[in-house]
Image (spheres, helix red, strand yellow):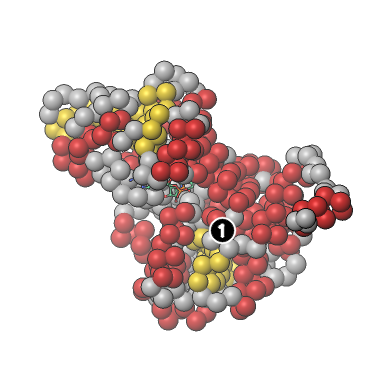
Amino acid sequence: MRPESTIRDISLAPEGERKIEWVAQHAQTLNSFAAERLSDGALSGRRIAIALHLEAKTAYLAWLFHEAGAEVAATGSNPFSTQDDVCAALVRRGLTVHAIHGADPKTFDQHLLATLDFKPDLIVDDGAELVTRLHQHRRDLLPGVRGASEETTSGVLRLRAMEREGALDIPVIAANDARCKYLFDNRYGTGQSALTAILAATNLLLAGKAVIVAGYGWVGQGLALYCRGFGARVIVVEVDPIRGLDAAANGFEVLTMAEAAPIGDVFVTGTGSIRILRREHFERMKDGALLANAGNYAHEIDVPALAAMAIEEREARRHVTEYVLADGRRIHLLAQGALVNIVASDGHPVEIMDLSFSVQALSVHYLARHAAELAPGVHALPAEIDDAIARRRLDLLGMRLEEPTPEQLAYARTWR
Ligand SMILES: NC(=O)c1ccc[n+]([C@@H]2O[C@H](COP(=O)([O-])OP(=O)(O)OC[C@H]3O[C@@H](n4cnc5c(N)ncnc54)[C@H](O)[C@@H]3O)[C@@H](O)[C@H]2O)c1
């Protein structure tokens, strides 16, 4: 083991290797970019720090950066999604890792800071975990950081808040806001993986059940779509009138949470906000209600309030905590209210992360070449790079796009 790594157990590496190899076989888009753009020398000698859910797909991204000539240090963006065998495999391959599954909040924080102490010049972040700590606790390292890219909606929100306050001192690419990311990852990736995680954790039937989806953004749309596909009655809870109307136009009922609380069999949050499910809702839920969160932070379900209401708490199944209330009703919380698809399962399907991590890989590559031209602040990935990823993926799927004729191009530019 490299001395500077902090992991559970290096002897777990063979199982981690198998997982990474499986990803490598199915990450066709990323592989094709690795074979050309990533290996053009732009990443050679760079120091890249990664804070993402540290399972096999992330490990493969980290490995491709390493193969492209970069020094890489990786940590997890949530200790419950860290897979110790994958960490061991990465260390055995020569990368630096600071991550242990289930680390307590203090240790998790130390792992993030240790990853910054690697002195990166480029950062791949999730939830702005590294970038916020860089600005708050490791300002001495700021001059060496050329830029970062951000994986998720909640992270982009935090970074924009920093930008508004004039507190963001580096350029950050909002990888989340690339169309090749949110249209597929947030929507179809979370839809499939959160649903399969809930089903695997509970072994219960969805058909005929009332599923309450809180938030009808990209994540909520995917959840609602897939739950309907499994035969559930889907009810959407929203605060945004356009998104609420969109849900209604797609055939879903739209209710307040107070109205939905006594109806729901399953509740899934995906808003990026806080305390979407709270005491006043727990008080009205049916016996056996299942609660899961697909939003980035574990604040969407008020778990402390639920625990305070309970007279008894036990692990009913792996990833399912049962809270027994004073009137005898049982409420089942999945994955302790953290990201259900990542904590109770392996996260998004490989082909989804193949697209998301193509966005991340090309964001980092773009920063390596152009960071000096970018002002501090949040930037979009150039649209031509986003388009190139979609084109490449379509090519690999054996699908072809129509080329507009010169006449059609001219027509689009005329107004008479
Ligand atoms: N589980 C995963 O793997 C995964 C993947 C991608 C994104 N995420 C996370 O999921 C969350 C949502 O992401 P998104 O891309 O859908 O964001 P989004 O901004 O597109 O959608 C969020 C929606 O929630 C609604 N909302 C906000 N407050 C609400 C409230 N109090 N009640 C009901 N609805 C409310 C908003 O109006 C919006 O429509 C973020 O935290 C994001 O980081 C998770």
Residue 280: image x %, image y %?
20, 37
**Furthest residue in direction top, as rendered:** 208
Q: How many marks?
A: 1
Classify mark 1: helix, strand or loop: helix
Q: Residues within 10 Å of mark 1 (few under 14, many from 20)?
A: many
Q: Quadrant of residue 149?
A: bottom right
Point 47% across, 57% down: residue: 126
Point 44% across, 62% down: residue: 128
Above-or-below relation of 1 to 269 = below
Residue 313 is left or right of residue 208, and the answer is left
Q: What residue is shown with label 1?
A: 175
Residue 3 is left or right of residue 21, and the answer is left
Point 38% across, 73% down: residue: 165
Residue 114: image x %, image y %?
42, 68
Residue 65: image x %, image y %?
63, 62
Residue 152: image x %, image y %?
48, 54
Q: Amino acid at mark 1?
A: Ala
Q: Nearer the viewer, residue 276 or 19?
A: 276
Residue 275 is left or right of residue 292, and the answer is left
- For the C terminus, give its image quadrant: bottom right
